[in-house]
Image (cartoon, rainbow, N blue to C red):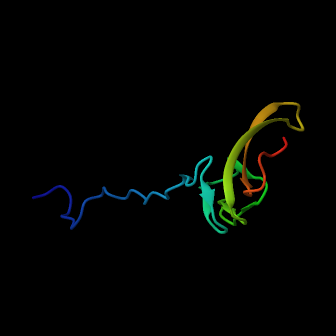
């Protein structure tokens, strides 16, 4: 006699499907309007010029141009310094973004 009843399947194999998060278009690449630049959870990257943040925190382009990633140092309300990453879209007529 068996100690436990026979079951039809194993108790393993319940891993979730990966969400494919991360940077999709990198620095210097061209983006068209509506292209997704970063898929993220939370605000790891912040939207800059010509970039919007979607409902699921993804960043997407609103105009055509070249992608520019930049970092800034900010002081929070509690006095702590932190670096933030900003994504911009530069149109072909612009050369750089003022910080």
27 horizontally vs 3: left or right: right
Q: State the residue in front, 21 or 3.
A: 21
Q: Is residue 79 left or right of residue 15?
A: right
* Residue drawn at (69%, 66%) of the image: 55
Residue 39 visible in the snapshot: no
| Residue 66 placement: quadrant | bottom right
Q: Image quarter for residue 65?
A: bottom right
Q: Position of residue 96 (x, y in %)?
A: 78, 45
Q: Relative to 76, is 61 on the left or the right?
A: left
**Is 75 situated above or below 37?**
above
The answer to whether 82 is drawn above or below residue 4 in the figure is: above
Is residue 6 toward the left or the right of residue 41 in the image? Answer: left
Residue lying at the far front in this picture: please name it.
93
Residue drawn at the location 74% of the way across and 38% of the way down: 71
Please state, as top left, top right, bottom left or bottom right, where the N terminus lies in the image.
bottom left
State the image coordinates of residue 3 (x, y, percent, origin top left).
17, 55
What is the quadrant of the C terminus in the image?
top right
Measured from the top left, where is residue 25 in percent x and y?
A: 57, 54
Q: Residue most toward the top?
A: 80
Residue 78 vertical placement versus 35 (above, below):
above
**x%, y% of residue 38?**
61, 55
Looking at the image, can residue 61 be seen? yes
Q: Give whichever of 3, 41 is nearer the camera.
A: 41
């Amino acid at each position: 006699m068996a100690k436990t009843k026979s079951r039809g399947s194993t108790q393993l194999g319940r891993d979730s499907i990966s969400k494919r998060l991360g940077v999709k278009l990198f620095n210097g690449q061209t983006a068209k309007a509506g292209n997704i630049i970063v898929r993220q959870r939370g605000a790891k990257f912040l939207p800059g010029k010509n970039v919007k943040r979607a409902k699921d925190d993804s960043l997407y382009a609103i105009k055509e141009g070249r992608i520019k990633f930049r970092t800034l140092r900010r002081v929070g309300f509690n006095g702590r310094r932190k670096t933030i990453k900003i994504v911009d879209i530069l149109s072909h007529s612009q050369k750089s973004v003022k910080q």
